[in-house]
């Protein structure tokens, strides 16, 4: 990313700022003028009913929407004050700084070791084999998986359970030392115990990383996040401290959604 | 909240909670009224009924607690639903204490019924009780109507109750000083007056809970403690 220190205004403890972000798919608007500040080392949850635009917004943050033909993104998104849609921005470098974990665990058809080593290898992050092994083990440990797989790192990643596969994907994401981790409904495919382990992991990860998580489960958003943003029909309706959003939200639409009411 | 829950049973359960609180509140108000009436005329039969009926109030507290706990576990309530359920848990506790105080008034009425009737004191205490009954009535109205301003108004009225308690306290002292054969009965009446004052305090708690459940904020202004009985001194 270019260092444009003259026009970089990175506020302390704001990792990412989105200003007036509009997204349309082949002319059909999906997001209308979203303003959001993502604070460093906190978990921000994006909630809202299906089709509200939360996943669309998430995918703007690492430019995954670039891969969708007909998708048009307008507005400003700054990562540490750098415009991620700026001229000359390398998308590969952006996606190193902003990692992503998906709904369905998607380990590569490789060994556990190679799954985690893939990113550091292609980015040339390891000085030698020992260093690479250290990175892999550290990532697996931080993802809470090392104890379970330490003695079988050469086995295929696809042989793990659902919950383990998801932790492997998290290890893979953190192996390249991202700053921001995006999670798109990371627990939807997992059982309650695996879910709880991921939630515990998220709690630990936020000391090192900033996390934005899209979730269908309000209870999960309530448990796991520090701040919550409620999306509805392409608008960001309300954003605030999770405790406030779930005990006394300001907007009636928020209250209706989180209490399970119509209208 | 004008809107209905998507799951109808959720609304039904909340309606049941409303009904239980309204019933418990109504019974407490009636218990206080009856206890004060019975004191006025030394109606010991009526007083015994007040004591017996307190069991119904206690049962309602248990029912409300169980119902609220169940809803917390099964519905994962949020926002106003959550505040409502927590408020009901706390209100049932206050209402149960209020019922106990009314029962205690009835018990003391039976105790002093052998002594000469001091009508003026009975009337003063009944007047205080009527003020508090009106407060209970308003607090319950505020709950049913979800009217935050009405709930807040109840809190201010407690000041008058406290002032009346202070003056009744002095009144009782004069009777004691006048004739020491009055002392036993008057000592019981001191407790009775205090009980009514405490019912008033608990009523403001109830009103504060109603205010919180509607607005999500605590009622800002502190309650002025106008009860000066604790400072009444020898020779005052």
Image: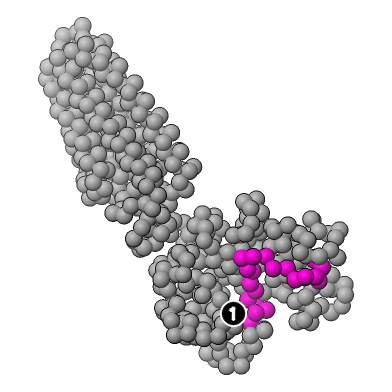
Q: Is residue A198 left or right of residue B13?
A: right
The 10 Å Cα crowd at callout 1, few under 14, some 14 to 19, many 20 or more, is some
Chain identity of mark 1: A
Q: Is residue A138 left or right of residue A71?
A: right
Q: Which residue is mark 1?
A: A64
Residue placed most toward the observer, A158 or A14 = A158
| The image quarter in which residue B46 lies | top left
For the C terminus of chain B, give its image quadrant: top left
Residue B83 in picture, x, y percent from top left? 38, 47
Q: Residue at x 25, y 39 (%)?
A: B140
Residue placed most toward the observer, A83 or B155 = A83
Residue B133 in picture, x, y percent from top left? 20, 32
* Highlighted magenta segment, given as a residue range: A93-114
* Residue B201 seen from this side: no
- Specify how the rendered protein is coloured: one colour
Q: Within the magenta stretch, is there residue A103?
A: yes
Q: Vertically, is B7 above or below A69? A: above
Q: Is residue A149 left or right of residue A241?
A: right
Q: Residue at x 31, y 54 (%)?
A: B3
* Residue B24 seen from this side: yes
Q: Vertically, is A178 above or below A145? A: below
Residue placed most toward the observer, A138 or B196 = A138
Q: Vertically, is A160 above or below B47? A: below
Q: Secondary structure at mark 1?
A: helix
Residue A7 in picture, x, y percent from top left? 52, 90
Q: Residue at x 20, y 22 (%)?
A: B34
Residue B217 in picture, x, y percent from top left? 35, 53
């Amino acid at each position: 990313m270019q260092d444009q220190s003259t026009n970089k205004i990175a506020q302390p403890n704001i990792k990412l700022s989105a200003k007036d972000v509009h997204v349309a798919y082949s002319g059909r608007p999906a997001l209308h003028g979203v303003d959001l500040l993502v604070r460093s080392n906190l978990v921000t949850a994006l909630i809202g009913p299906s089709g509200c635009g939360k996943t669309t917004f998430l995918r703007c943050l690492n430019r995954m929407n670039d891969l969708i033909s007909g998708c048009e993104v307008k507005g400003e998104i700054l990562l540490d004050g750098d415009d991620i849609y700026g001229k000359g921005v390398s998308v590969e470098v952006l996606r190193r700084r902003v990692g992503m974990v998906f709904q369905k665990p998607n380990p590569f058809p490789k060994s556990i070791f190679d799954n985690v080593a893939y990113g550091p290898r292609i980015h040339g992050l390891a000085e030698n084999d020992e260093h690479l092994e250290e990175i892999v083990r550290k990532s697996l440990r931080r993802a809470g998986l090392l104890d379970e797989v330490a003695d079988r790192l050469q086995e295929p990643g696809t042989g793990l359970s659902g919950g383990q596969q998801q932790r492997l994907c998290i290890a893979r994401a953190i192996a390249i030392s991202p700053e921001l981790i995006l999670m798109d409904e990371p627990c939807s495919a997992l059982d309650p115990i695996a879910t709880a382990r991921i939630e515990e992991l998220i709690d630990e990860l936020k000391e090192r990383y900033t996390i934005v998580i899209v979730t269908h489960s309000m209870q999960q958003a309530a448990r796991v996040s520090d701040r919550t943003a409620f999306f509805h029909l392409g608008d960001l309706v309300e954003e605030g401290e999770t405790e406030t959003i779930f005990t006394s939200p300001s907007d009636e639409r928020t209250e209706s959604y989180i209490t399970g009411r119509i209208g | 909240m004008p809107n209905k829950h998507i799951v109808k049973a959720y609304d039904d359960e909340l309606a049941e909670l409303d009904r239980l609180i309204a019933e418990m509140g109504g019974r407490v108000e009636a218990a206080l009224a009856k206890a004060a009436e019975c004191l006025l005329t030394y109606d010991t039969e009526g007083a015994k009924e007040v004591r017996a009926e307190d069991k119904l109030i206690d049962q309602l507290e248990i029912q409300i607690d169980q119902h609220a706990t169940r809803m917390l576990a099964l519905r994962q309530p949020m926002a106003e639903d959550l505040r409502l359920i927590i408020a009901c848990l706390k209100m049932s506790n206050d209402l149960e204490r209020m019922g106990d105080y009314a029962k205690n008034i009835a018990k003391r009425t039976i105790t002093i019924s052998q002594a000469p009737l001091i009508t003026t004191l009975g009337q003063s205490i009944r007047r205080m009780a009527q003020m508090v009954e009106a407060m209970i009535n308003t607090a319950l109205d505020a709950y049913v109507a979800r009217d935050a301003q009405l709930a807040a108004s109840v809190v201010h009225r407690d000041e008058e109750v406290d002032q009346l308690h202070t003056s009744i306290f002095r009144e009782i002292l004069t009777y004691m000083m006048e004739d020491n054969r009055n002392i036993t009965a008057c000592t019981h009446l001191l407790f009775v007056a205090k009980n009514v004052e405490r019912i008033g305090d608990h009523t403001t708690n109830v009103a504060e809970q109603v205010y919180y459940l509607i607005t999500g904020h605590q009622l800002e202004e502190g309650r002025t403690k106008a009860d000066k009985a604790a400072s009444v001194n020898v020779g005052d």
